[in-house]
Amino acid sequence: MKSAAIGVVSVLVLSACAGAPRDMASEASHAPLANPEAPSTFTQQVHSGAVATLPFADTRDFAFADRGFVATRKDPVIKTAAGQTVWDLSAFDFLKKPAPPTVNPSLWRQGQLMARHGLYQVSETVWQVRGFDLANITFVKGATGWIVIDTLGSNETAKAAFDLLSEHVGQRPIVAVIYTHSHTDHFAGTAGIVNLEDVRAGKVAVIAPKGFLHAAVGENVIAGPAMQRRAMYQFGTPLPKSDGGLVNAGIGPGLSTGTTSLIPPTREIGATGETLTIDGVNMVFQFTPGTEAPAEMNVWFPDWKIVDMAENANATQHNILTPRGAVVRDAKVWAEGLTQSLRLFGEADVLIASHGWPRFGNPAIRDYLGKHRDAYAYLHDQTVRLMNKGMNGDEIAATLDLPEALAQEWYDRPYYGSLSFNSRAVYQFYMGWYDANPVNLAPMPPVETGKRYVAAMGGASSVKAQARTAYDAGDYAWAAELLNHAVMADGADAEAKDLLARSYDQLGWQAEPSTWRNIYLTGAKELREGVGAPRANPASQMAAIANLPIGSLMDLLSVRLDAAKAQGQSAKLAFVLTDTGEKTFVTINNGVLVHEEIAAPESVDATLTLTRADFLGGIFGGQPLPPKIASGAVKLEGNPQALLKLSQWMDPPGAPFPIVTR
């Protein structure tokens, strides 16, 4: 009985933590949808307006981006050990051509800059590898080795970057890693260049802002399934890299798809002004929580007058609320942080960041930081002013524009974040989603709303006729509004889905923000083809959680407990990890899983005693525990039915949920 129960636990608890693909064909209409139409005259007029009003003659960014180029990889394809392609440096070569009619010329320009790839020497002591992933990886030369700032989004791309550096600059050990903040594209490649045992032995320091691990787990693990699904839209991961698909991710070319890792920090920075000297390199930190990430910091190298602005200053307006979902950021705190940066680092001659290219020369840096700050301050202050006059988030978004002096700066353009989206985020930060209008107090869900709107408008044929009129007039947003109701009301209506997809095509081709383009075009693709299964990478999924403390792992289980299944039942469990000394006491009652990282203070229904590796493999990795229980490697005491109940209460695996249909 013990073996059977543990076997079920192993399979079902894994299923609750790692998504699995399933066939979505039954959820999509079998009627074929047509291919996209060509960009309309209305879309081409939007592009012409961008060319006429933006300073395309200003090419200083191209000079900054090309400065210090050393070399790039001979083989453009970066692969996993198993041969899976992680990143292809040649995939964005199509951007070398002039802007096509399917891409906003402003976004095309940003794509051209972000597609540059290779090793760049920033100064006598600082190198960057750019274009190997969404972010940059920075190498700072110490007396004996390298200090690495941000490690990209996968082990394979980080290793490829370090190999390129070693090939052209020389072999040196890594003595420290600095995570500027808690987003995956800045820490997930660490295991590709650093040995975990060396970190534990103190040979490599890992430095991060205070609260890093809590923020990384909260944003990337606990809400992982929903956030990853929405990120597919934001980053356009289902789209082909082409002038009709993905051209840029706003802050970088795109996301790599390799193996991820998380090595926890060995030291945290918790206050502005903290200093460190590592391998002869003097550093001063600016602690900036609540800006671009819940845990973030900038790094100042006073001896060289070089500042690393992390992701607090970018080559684009950033997100106050990301479309993929996250905690809303504080635009006021962000602007104030940049004011402090100007005071602390106002003497900088070189500015580097986690994305984009460096800026050189003190006048250019001060102008950049000041106007970048002003964009966030203007966003915050004017949103709040209009909010206090009674406007809601959508009304503010339709009204607000940056002043001309800011809007003409390329780094304040909306390639990643936009004034429209961000003003609604500021509204949400203060007011929440509810706008005080009673009609929005308890809105109906989209399917029910769609059915009633379609009925009120005289049926689906009438809705589609009005949408076609709007489409033919170039009013694609209104056409999409109408057709969304039709599709929600009837997901098998191929005609409505086709016209909605066409509307999204035109909106995507017009869009200056990369995020908007990717979202529109991914929506169009899924309307035509249905929801595809994600590329499964079990090794990467395990690596992402392998080094988390047991409390964080139990947090992951707690949000997968189906309260309805556990209704009226309870359980008490204890887990003891023999090699690390970690213990957790788990109670399940009232549909809630509560865990305390202590030895069980009272009797429990069952206790599982095992190594950390067996715990991870059995609970999260799909590795059956019965043979290890039978051999004595894993000890089970108490009632195995308690563990069986735990497994039965967990959510089963699920495919990516639909977004543009229901």
Image (cartoon, rainbow, N blue to C red):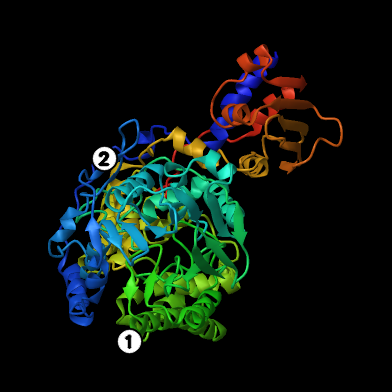
Is 246 on the left or on the right of 332, as rendered? left
Identify whether 370 is placed above or below 237: below
Q: Amino acid at mark 1?
A: Glu
Looking at the rendered image, the quarter that the N terminus falls into is top right
User: Residue 422: image x %, image y %?
Assistant: 45, 71
Task: Report the residue marked by disc 2.
Answer: 31
- How far apart, in angstroms, are the residues tagged by discs 1 and 2? 48 Å
Determine whether, in the image, residue 639 is placed left or right of residue 322. right
Q: Which mark is residue 601?
A: none
Callout in the foreground (1, 2):
1
Q: Residue at x 22, y 72 (%)?
A: 63
Residue to which mark 1 is pinned:
404
> Can you say whether 311 is above or below 82 in the image?
below
| Amino acid identity at mark 2 | Ala
Taking the image as shown, residue 597 lies to the left or right of residue 463, namely right
Q: Measuring from the top left, give residue 329's x and y in whole percent.
A: 53, 68
Measured along the vertical axis of the image, is residue 550 above or below residue 318? above
Return the residue nearer the eye: 519 or 315. 315
Circles 1 and 2 in contact, beta carbons < 8 Å: no
In percent of width and height, residue 283 lies at 51, 67
Question: In the rendered view, does 352 fall on the left or right side of 631?
Answer: left
